[in-house]
Image: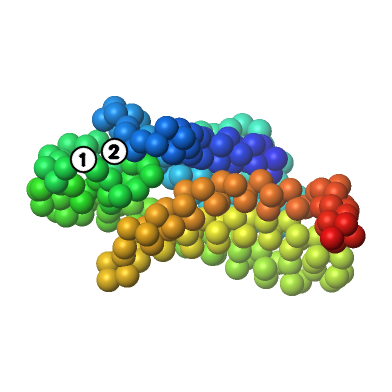
Amino acid sequence: MYFFLLNLSVLDLGSISTTLPKAMANSLWDTRDISYAGCVAQLLFFFFFISAEYCLLTIMAYDRYVAICKPLHYGTLLGSRACVHMAAAAWGSGFLYALLHTANTFSLPLCQGNALDQFFCEIPQILKLSCSDYYFREAGLLVVSVSFAFGCFVFIVLSYVQIFRAVLRIPSEQGRHKAFSTCLPHLSVISLFLSTAVFAYLKPPSISSPALDLVVAVLYSLVPPILNPLIYSMRNQELKDALWKLAQWTLFHH
């Protein structure tokens, strides 16, 4: 579990480092400029980290399934070599996905100006600048992407159905609590990740506006990477005690 958490932390750090520093620099220097090559790189790496994280969260669901439903086989099914191979598959799949989308997006002619209504280079905003009929070219990649994402989602749901069935059969309340506490951080991270991303890309065009697009982009690009470490750290009793002392001190001094 901690090996996968290390990979998740690196992906979170990578995704937030792709967009936030440039946005902060532009804000400080009161500019909105980014080079064409910089825009390509930003789009490639952002989608690489985001899609690799989704693959990794799917693998982590399998990790929780084996740990709770097949604990005696955990060392065999998820040895160090298997974990490395699965993590490498997540990183490789994310890079391939990002490369395909980036190459397809920037192969389109842009004739509607070069100003994006966003604080980072995002595919929907770039496609709005295209004068060609990009819908047909995006259709194939979109079908593949949705199929892959839905397949991962179904796998996560089925894994947790088996996990909850196994947990509810545990006779002791302490055992059930321990099993649930192991799964809840992962479920929280998945829910936050999927809810923000789905709303960002599948919201109806009728409610779309520059202000709403900006808020949604912040939600799915910045909030999950920032909250993920906190969500997983809440299982650490020392951190809980420190937060409780901080809350008591704040209330006492106010």
Say whether residue 10 is left or right of residue 49.
Answer: right
Residue 185: x, y in percent? 67, 56
Residue depicted at x 31% and y 65%: 208
Q: Report the amino acid beneath label 1.
A: Asn
Label 2 packing within 10 angstroms: few (<14), some (14-19), many (20+): many
Q: Is residue 244 visible?
A: no
Using the image as rendered, state which of residue 174 and residue 54 is in the foreground.
Answer: 54
Helix, strand or loop at mark 1: loop
Using the image as rendered, state which of residue 192 and residue 110 is in the foreground.
Answer: 110
Display colour scheme: rainbow
Picture layout, residue 172 above or below residue 184: below
Say whether residue 84 is left or right of residue 126.
Answer: right
Image quadrant containing the C terminus: bottom right
Residue depicted at x 28% and y 45%: 116
Residue depicted at x 17% and y 37%: 107
Label 1 packing within 10 angstroms: few (<14), some (14-19), many (20+): few
Helix, strand or loop at mark 2: helix
Identify the residue under disc 2.
Answer: 102
Say whether residue 145 is left or right of residue 184.
Answer: left
Mark 1 or 2: in front is 1
Identify the residue under disc 1.
Answer: 114
Residue depicted at x 74% and y 72%: 168
Using the image as rendered, state which of residue 235 and residue 42 is in the foreground.
Answer: 42
Picture layout, residue 94 above or below residue 207: above
Residue 119: x, y in percent? 38, 44
Q: Quadrant of residue 205?
A: bottom left
Q: Report the amino acid beneath label 2.
A: Thr
